[in-house]
Image (tube, rainbow, N blue to C red):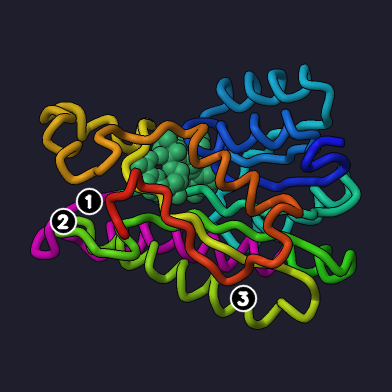
Amino acid sequence: MKLLENKVALITGASRGIGEAIAVKFAENGANVAFTYLSSDEKAKALEDKLSALGIKAKAYKCDAGDYAATEQLANDVVKEFGGIDICVNNAGISKDNLLLRLTPDQWDDVMQANLKSVYNLTRQVIRPMMKARSGSIINMSSVVGVEGNGGQSSYAASKAGIIGFTKSIAQEMGSRNIRCNAIAPGFIETDMTHYLKDGGAEKWFEKIPLARFGKPEEIAGVALFLASDLSSYVSGQVINACGGMST
Ligand code: NAP
């Protein structure tokens, strides 16, 4: 029996990067996968085909995770199509980095909406089907920057720290309903989001990372699989750092 056999997973922001790796890992482990994206139509279609070829049910939904009404519609559509939602991975996120003196109100709002409001939006939608099923696992994508802060990334760090407070609160609120809520705090992972870091030479970053390399999306997907499955049935309200030992 596969770890996620007969489970339904909803993953936000899975057309690329970490979300895509989680979608593939979950499908390989037997889950039916509904996933969202914002603008990458072709990549989303390609992923839908790739997941379906693994023999599970898969569907891509174009949905802005920061838009409350859109997420309400999304959750209704997924429940109708898939019959429920057992696992929710709030992965969608953006960065608009700037020093505070140059950080505009619009930049601040955009990051908060995409990174933090999105987590509230989707979590509020999925707890209803999870409460009905008396079981669920919610996984929120924070960041090591949300744990430790980082100059030039105050909006991103604040949104990711907010996710940690939200995660711990929901774990306390929903534990009696057998709904678990955990966060993952990745370090530097090789995706489009961190592509620019390599321009200045990746080696200087490696000095700060005991494992002396960036992580791969699949390595975050492995942590997500643990948190999604019964392997972590007594784990809730936790933040798992997956950062090559950078934060200890
Ligand atoms: P990425 O490669 O830039 O991919 C971002 C994904 O999110 C894409 O699928 C994008 O869809 C989607 N997305 C963005 N805004 C959205 C919205 N409002 N609604 C729905 N989907 C949206 O990012 P990544 O590196 O994989 O990061 C994934 C998550 O991990 C983010 O929350 C990020 O903050 C976090 N994280 C990443 C790192 C890292 O080093 N990469 C480290 C720590 C935490 P489109 O393709 O349609 O634009």
Task: Left or right? Give the position of 115 relative to 233.
Answer: left
Task: Left or right? Give the position of 190 relative to 35.
Answer: left
Q: Is residue 26 above or below residue 162?
A: above
Tell me which corner region of the image, top left, top right, bottom left or bottom right, holds residue 142: bottom left
Percent across and percent down for residue 132 are 89, 68
Q: Quadrant of the N terminus?
A: top right
Percent across and percent down for residue 180 are 69, 67
Find ligand 1 in the image and state its quadrant. top left
Mark 3 vs mark 1, foreground winner is 3
Percent across and percent down for residue 43 are 56, 23
* SS assignment at label 3: helix
- Which residue is disc 2 drawn over? 152
Q: Residue at x 60, y 37 (%)?
A: 22
Q: Is residue 151 visible?
A: yes
Q: Identity of the amino acid at label 1? A: Asp
* Badge 1 vs badge 2, beta-carbon distance below 8 Å: yes
Q: Nearer the viewer, residue 116 or 176?
A: 176
Q: Is residue 141 above or below residue 160?
A: above
* SS assignment at label 2: loop
Q: Is residue 38 visible?
A: no
Q: Nearer the viewer, residue 217 or 222?
A: 222
* Badge 2 vs badge 3, beta-carbon distance below 8 Å: no
- Alpha carbon separation for disc pair 3 and 1: 28 Å
- Which residue is disc 3 drawn over? 170
> Residue 97 bears which disc, if any?
1
63 drawn magenta: no
Percent across and percent down for residue 163 are 46, 67
Q: Residues within 10 Å of mark 2 (few under 14, many from 20)?
A: some
Tell me which corner region of the image, top left, top right, bottom left or bottom right, holds residue 11: top right
Q: Identity of the amino acid at label 2? A: Gly
Q: Residues within 10 Å of mark 3 (few under 14, many from 20)?
A: many
- Residue stretch in magenta: 96-125
